[in-house]
Image (cartoon, rainbow, N blue to C red):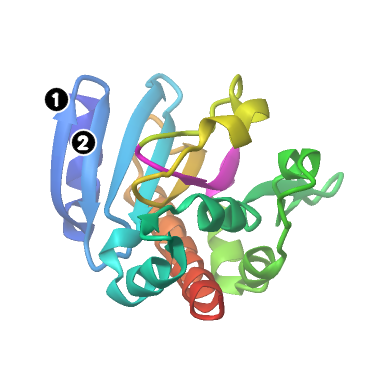
């Protein structure tokens, strides 16, 4: 029996559906703001996994209606300005401390390269004040977590990040992406996998809260 199948069995009560394709698992988390999570095995011997959670703002009618109001100019629909504005909320996880390390979210350092991007602290602050989230992170001890904005027509890869303003042209949608790199042990401990999904669900709620407030106050 494959490690992917064992993983699915460990979390089947927490998901509405799943697909296994080679070394990847696509799951639909139950009662979640996340559309789907892609789980990829990096090293099966040590239980190392990469998780990607996707939240498409098209699923939130109130947010999308306000996006439409502020994205139509001269009868042309263009999400570029709002897309670039939301990038300012991007954060990633860091571990602070020499002996006792504590998780803390910081603004994405790459954003400081761009004067046009207004870096915002709201999402970072909310995540850092979420004790339940931080406690779960301490248990899982993920190698990293980062939260970014993408679109179906563009994803910020390392080699294209410098060309961000040239590359983004009228994105068709706006998607929040939660990336996590964690060790779930070779024996697939149910609690670690469930906690990993819980971490992404908690982050998703805070993302939508901040996004909704931002869009409603444009």
Q: Is residue 73 above or below residue 109?
A: below
115 or 197: nearer the eye? 115
Q: Quadrant of residue 62?
A: bottom left
Tag 1 secondary structure: loop
- In this image, 30 relative to 72: left or right? left
Q: Position of residue 162 (x, y in %)?
A: 68, 27
**Mark 1 or 2, nearer chain start:** 1
117 or 179: nearer the eye? 117
- In this image, 7 relative to 120: left or right? left
Extreme-right residue of the structure: 98
Looking at the figure, which quarter contains the N terminus? top left
Q: Which residues are magenta?
A: 140-152
Looking at the figure, which quarter contains the C terminus? bottom right
State how far apart marks 1 and 2 are (Cα).
7 Å
- Local crowd size for mark 1, using a 10 Å CA cut-off: few (<14), some (14–19), many (≥20): few
Residue pointed to by mark 2: 6
Q: Position of residue 140 (x, y in %)?
A: 53, 49
Check if residue 41 falls in the magenta segment.
no
209 or 168: nearer the eye? 168
Please tell me the numbered disc located at residue 1.
1
Residue that appears at 20% across and 42% down: 8
Please tell me the numbered disc located at residue 66.
none
- In this image, 2 relative to 159: left or right? left
Residue that appears at 87% across and 44% down: 98
Tag 2 secondary structure: helix
Check if residue 147 falls in the magenta segment.
yes
């Amino acid at each position: 029996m494959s490690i992917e199948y064992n993983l699915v069995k460990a979390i089947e009560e927490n998901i509405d559906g799943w697909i296994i394709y080679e070394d990847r698992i696509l799951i639909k988390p139950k009662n979640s703001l996340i559309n789907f999570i892609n789980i990829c095995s990096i090293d099966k011997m040590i239980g190392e996994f990469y998780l990607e959670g996707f939240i498409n703002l098209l699923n939130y009618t109130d947010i999308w209606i306000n996006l439409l109001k502020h994205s139509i100019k001269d009868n042309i629909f263009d999400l570029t300005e709002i897309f670039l504005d939301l990038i300012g909320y991007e954060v990633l996880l860091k571990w602070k401390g020499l002996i006792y390390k504590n998780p803390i979210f910081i603004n994405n350092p790459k954003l400081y390269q761009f004067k046009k991007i207004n870096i915002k602290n709201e999402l970072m602050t909310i995540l850092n004040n979420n004790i339940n989230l931080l406690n779960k992170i301490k248990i899982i001890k993920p190698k990293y977590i980062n939260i970014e904005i993408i679109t179906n027509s563009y994803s910020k890869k390392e080699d294209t990040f410098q060309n961000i303003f040239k590359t983004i042209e009228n994105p068709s949608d706006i998607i929040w992406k939660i990336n996590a790199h964690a060790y779930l042990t070779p024996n697939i401990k149910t609690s670690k996998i469930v906690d990993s999904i819980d971490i992404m669900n908690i982050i998703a709620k805070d993302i939508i809260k901040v996004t909704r407030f931002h869009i409603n106050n444009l």
